Image (cartoon, rainbow, N blue to C red):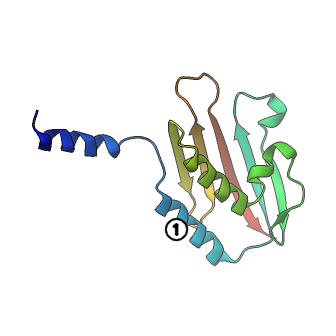
């Protein structure tokens, strides 16, 4: 196999894998900040192999950028800014699978993370919806 073929194969493989480009996150963060929305409600749901009470959707109230009623288990996603930080943190952790969808206004609508395909039941999904200004 020639050097060019090996290089081509390596470039193709480097482009594979489920991930979200840092530029997508940067663009989402800029879109969210452009909204100027500091007080809103957001529905957050974490889907995981967890006790049932941790997987129910919860509507969180955010006033002046601070979540006023986020349960402890959702604290990392209690505001849109924190959810965007969680996406960044997941990227830095280099999971086997990372899939993120963003609303046009910048908040992450779905975050799916599988830290290791070799481990069972470590994957989770976080859904954000119904972002409503107060």
Report which quarter residue 45 is drawn in. top right
Q: Outermost residue toward the right?
A: 69
Q: Position of residue 84 (x, y in %)?
A: 64, 58
Q: Which quadrant of the view contains residue 54?
A: top right
Q: Residue at x 63, y 61 (%)?
A: 107
Q: Position of residue 105 (x, y in %)?
A: 60, 68
- Residues 127 and 124: in front is 124
State whether residue 16 is above or below residue 107. Answer: above
Q: Quadrant of the N terminus?
A: top left
Residue at x 76%, y 29% (from the top left corner):
50
Left or right: where does residue 116 sit relative to residue 5?
right
Total numbered badges shown on the rendered structure: 1
Which quadrant of the structure image shows residue 132?
Answer: bottom right
The residue indicated by pointer 1 is 27
Look at the numbered disc 1 and give the secondary structure of its residue. Answer: helix
Q: Is residue 119 left or right of residue 2?
A: right
Q: Position of residue 97 (x, y in %)?
A: 51, 38
5 lies above or below 51: below
**Residue located at (80% from left, 29% from top):** 52
Tell me if mark 1 has few (under 14), some (14-19) or many (20+) residues whose alpha carbon lies within 10 angstroms of its own: some
Residue placed furthest toward the left: 2
- Quadrant showing the C terminus: bottom right
Which is nearer the eye, 105 or 67?
67
Residue 41 lies, in percent from the top left, at: 79, 62
């Amino acid at each position: 196999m020639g050097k060019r073929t090996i290089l081509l194969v390596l470039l193709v493989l480097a482009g594979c894998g489920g991930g979200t480009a840092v530029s997508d996150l940067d663009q989402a963060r800029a879109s969210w900040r452009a909204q100027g929305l500091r007080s809103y409600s957001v529905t957050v749901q974490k889907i995981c192999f967890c006790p049932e009470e941790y997987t129910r959707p919860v509507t969180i109230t955010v006033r002046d950028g601070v979540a006023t009623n986020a349960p402890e288990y959702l604290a990392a996603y209690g505001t849109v800014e924190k959810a965007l930080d969680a996406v960044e943190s997941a990227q830095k952790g280099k999971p086997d699978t990372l899939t993120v969808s963003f609303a046009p206004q910048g908040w992450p609508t779905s975050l799916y993370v599988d830290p290791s395909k070799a481990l069972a039941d470590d994957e989770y999904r976080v859904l954000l919806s119904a972002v409503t200004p107060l």
